[in-house]
Image (tube, rainbow, N blue to C red):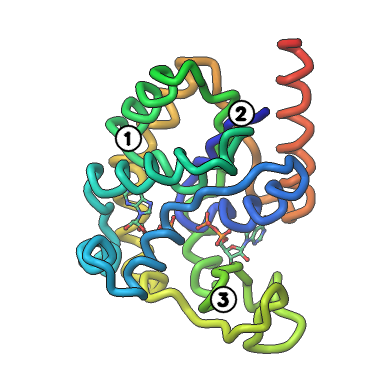
Amino acid sequence: MMRLVLLGPPGAGKGTQAQFLTGRLAIPKISTGEMLRQAADRGTPLGVQAQRYISRGELVPDDLVVSLVEERLQEPDVAAGFLLDGFPRTLNQAETLDEWLASRRQELNAVVDLQVPDDVIVDRLAYRVVCSVCQAPYHLLIRPPRTPGVCDVCGSPLEQRADDPAGLVRERLRVYHERTAPVTDYYRDRGLLVEVDGELPVPQVTDVIVRELTARVLARS
Ligand code: ADP
Ligand code: AMP
């Protein structure tokens, strides 16, 4: 049973690691970015509202994101644990999540902070493409798909994310430092933070995370 959060700036590799960690740890991932983009693609009222913020590189208001996550956390597949990717992103979201879990006698086991400097992020996101259907991320130079333009996982077309042009990435990094960096301190103060070098190659990052989490679980048993 593991309840985990993946923290880190946009482009730190959260989605990439989530893809591998769900298999290694046998827990489902909950990605708020993916859920919001899918809602926007479907044109639901929530999606239409969220898109206004996403397209400006801003955070979607807490109440919208929190209700989406709380609904998802009540589905049966997450009863045995989950990996949150991209949530919480504000102190208010973190506190609300804690209260929600505590009211069900649950708590987080660890929060993994993927550390990558801003200049590396800007470089990475200039080359990111994602699957238009399953949203698996690729890097055109470092982690290209087997067939150009086609998703390895589901065979659908790849596309650039609308919020990945450099100007918007700078804005998203600004928002990250202002609103999300305090969430890192919040979890550090609670002894939950596991800091990981996100500049290592993808498989090594996965290995370090699994090793650190295993060590924590063993230390507590
Ligand atoms: P996030 O979900 O945190 O926004 P992604 O997982 O989409 O980040 O990764 C951002 C970009 O960086 C993608 O193009 C991905 O292929 C690439 N990437 C992810 N992890 C690494 C890594 N460890 N080294 C180099 N590139 C990476
Ligand atoms: P991501 O896919 O995690 O990079 O998220 C893409 C965009 O979705 C962000 O820039 C925000 O606009 C929005 N978003 C995702 N998760 C959250 C969240 N927890 N709180 C607020 N906005 C979010």
Structural distance between the alpha carbons of marks 3 and 1: 28 Å
Q: Nearer the viewer, mark 1 or mark 2?
A: 1
Task: Of the two numbered discs 3 and 1 on the same chain, state the one appearing first in sequence.
Answer: 1
Q: Is residue 48 visible?
A: yes
- Mark 1 vs ligand 2: CB under 8 Å? yes
Q: Position of residue 216 (x, y in %)?
A: 71, 20
Above or below, comparing residue 64 to residue 142 in the picture: above
Structural distance between the alpha carbons of marks 1 and 2: 19 Å
- Which residue type carries mark 3? Cys
Residue wearing tag 1: 93
Q: Is residue 129 visible?
A: no
Residue wearing tag 3: 131
Describe the element under mark 1 as helix, strand or loop. Answer: helix
Structural distance between the alpha carbons of marks 3 and 2: 29 Å
Q: Position of residue 99 (x, y in %)?
A: 35, 21
Characterize the local packing of mark 2: few (<14), some (14-19) or many (20 or more) Cα atoms within 10 angstroms.
Answer: some
